[in-house]
Image (cartoon, rainbow, N blue to C red):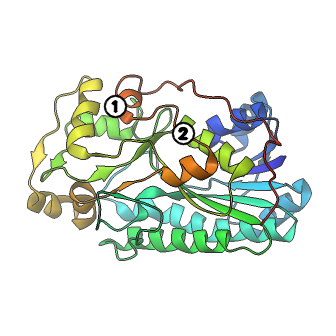
């Protein structure tokens, strides 16, 4: 299959390109930065420099490549996560996901792509109901911070447009919180720095559940979705959603850091606002049952307890991707 991968040098794109090549796919990777073209060539992908916010440029490259499938991993997240600067954190990525995805999807539909895979997030669901939620849970479109609420609305709209396309088979992959090389939770990532300096505390009872996944497992799930997924929305997370009071102290210990401080919710609310407090105290985990059943995928690292804590930054050795052609990629 000829695959156009937007965001080919991002956190998921980096492990995804070699997996796609190993599965027999031709890959054309899009990047905003010319200096990243040699890295794509080194793993067997053609590279193109494109501004995803330029619809004419996007249309031209899709028309030239004529891909069978488009994988949309577009983000513009800052190097450091700072809950005190949410406008900076969400702003550029919200624009890219709104305008860049619109241009890429329109070009894919116009130029004969048969499949479109969209990056989304598992933690866009509202913090209500059971401890672990599936893909049908209510999106948190009324999140208590405007940039975050906008992010959820954009992603939900993108999911609806992609999965509802009449011209191609669209899948939305809701990835969990990523760890592994290049992520905020890598040993040299910004969250690790926050943990070492004890600026990432346990808030209240620390009951907010996070669903994590190694970037390599996220890439493996993307290959599975490309080759055999039916149109729809899929959570791509590990098997062990856990409250912050469990995973955060374990992560600190693995980093050789002191245990995280405990901060009452009222004080955290004054310091960083309502959204991070709700995420830390009330967030729900995500179920991967649909991805396991319908994509025939399972995480090579089933739990953050081994992946995040024991070998934080190593790429796990998981089952090889199924060879290309094992299932029909025709649009439904």
Classify mark 2: helix, strand or loop. Answer: loop
Which of marks 2 and 1 precedes in the sequence?
2
Q: Is residue 241 above or below residue 23?
A: below
Query: What residue sits right under mark 2 in the picture?
Result: 298
Classify mark 1: helix, strand or loop. Answer: helix
Question: Which label lies toward us, 1 or 2?
Answer: 2
The image quadrant of residue 303 is top left
Residue at image position (23%, 39%) is: 246
| Residue at the outermost front position | 293
Residue at image position (44%, 42%) is: 238
Is the C terminus in the top left, top right, bottom left or bottom right quadrant?
bottom right
Residue at image position (15%, 57%) is: 268
**How far from the left and from the top, in percent, is residue 307?**
41, 29
- Of the pair 62 and 226, the residue shown nearer to us: 226
Callout 1–callout 2 Cβ contact below 8 Å? no
**How far from the left and from the top, in percent, is residue 2?**
85, 47
The image quadrant of residue 114 is bottom right
Residue at image position (69%, 61%) is: 52
**How far from the left and from the top, in percent, is residue 64?**
91, 57
**How far from the left and from the top, in percent, is residue 89?**
42, 58
The mark found on residue 146 in the picture is none
- Of the pair 321 and 256, the residue shown nearer to us: 321
Q: Is residue 249 above or below residue 281?
A: above
How packed is label 1: few (under 14 Cα within 10 Å), some, or many (20 or more)? some
The image quadrant of residue 279 is bottom left
Q: Is residue 56 visible?
A: no
Going by the image, does 90 lie left or right of 218? left
Going by the image, does 58 lie left or right of 220? right
Q: Is residue 147 above or below residue 228?
A: below
Query: What residue sits right under mark 1 in the picture?
Result: 305
């Amino acid at each position: 299959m000829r695959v156009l991968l937007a965001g080919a040098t991002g956190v998921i794109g980096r492990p995804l390109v070699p997996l796609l090549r190993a599965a027999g796919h031709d890959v054309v990777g899009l990047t905003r930065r010319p200096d990243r073209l040699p890295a794509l060539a080194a793993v067997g992908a053609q590279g193109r420099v494109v501004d995803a916010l330029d619809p004419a440029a996007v249309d031209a490259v899709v028309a030239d490549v004529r891909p069978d499938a488009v994988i949309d991993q577009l983000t513009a997240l800052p190097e450091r996560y700072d809950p005190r600067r949410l406008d900076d954190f969400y702003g550029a990525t919200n624009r890219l996901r709104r305008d860049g995805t619109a241009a890429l999807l329109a070009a894919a539909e116009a130029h004969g792509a048969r499949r479109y895979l969209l990056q989304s997030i598992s933690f866009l669901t509202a913090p209500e109901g059971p401890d672990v939620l599936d893909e049908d849970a209510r999106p948190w479109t009324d999140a208590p911070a405007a940039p975050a609420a906008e992010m959820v609305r954009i992603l939900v709209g993108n999911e609806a447009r992609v999965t509802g396309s009449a011209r191609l088979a669209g899948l939305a992959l809701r990835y969990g919180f990523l760890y592994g090389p290049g992520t905020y939770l890598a040993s040299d990532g910004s969250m690790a720095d926050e943990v070492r300096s004890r600026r990432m505390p346990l808030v209240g009872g620390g009951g907010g559940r996070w669903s994590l996944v190694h970037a390599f497992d996220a890439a493996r799930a993307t290959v599975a979705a490309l080759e055999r997924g039916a149109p729809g929305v899929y959570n791509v997370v590990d098997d062990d959603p856990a409250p912050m009071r469990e995973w955060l102290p374990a992560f600190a210990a693995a980093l050789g850091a002191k245990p995280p401080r405990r901060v009452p919710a009222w004080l955290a609310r004054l310091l960083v606002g309502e959204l991070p407090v709700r995420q830390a105290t009330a967030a729900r985990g995500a179920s991967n049952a649909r991805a396991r059943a319908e994509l025939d995928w399972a995480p090579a690292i089933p739990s953050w307890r081994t992946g995040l804590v024991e070998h934080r930054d190593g790429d796990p050795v998981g089952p090889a991707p199924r060879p290309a052609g094992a299932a029909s990629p025709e649009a439904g």
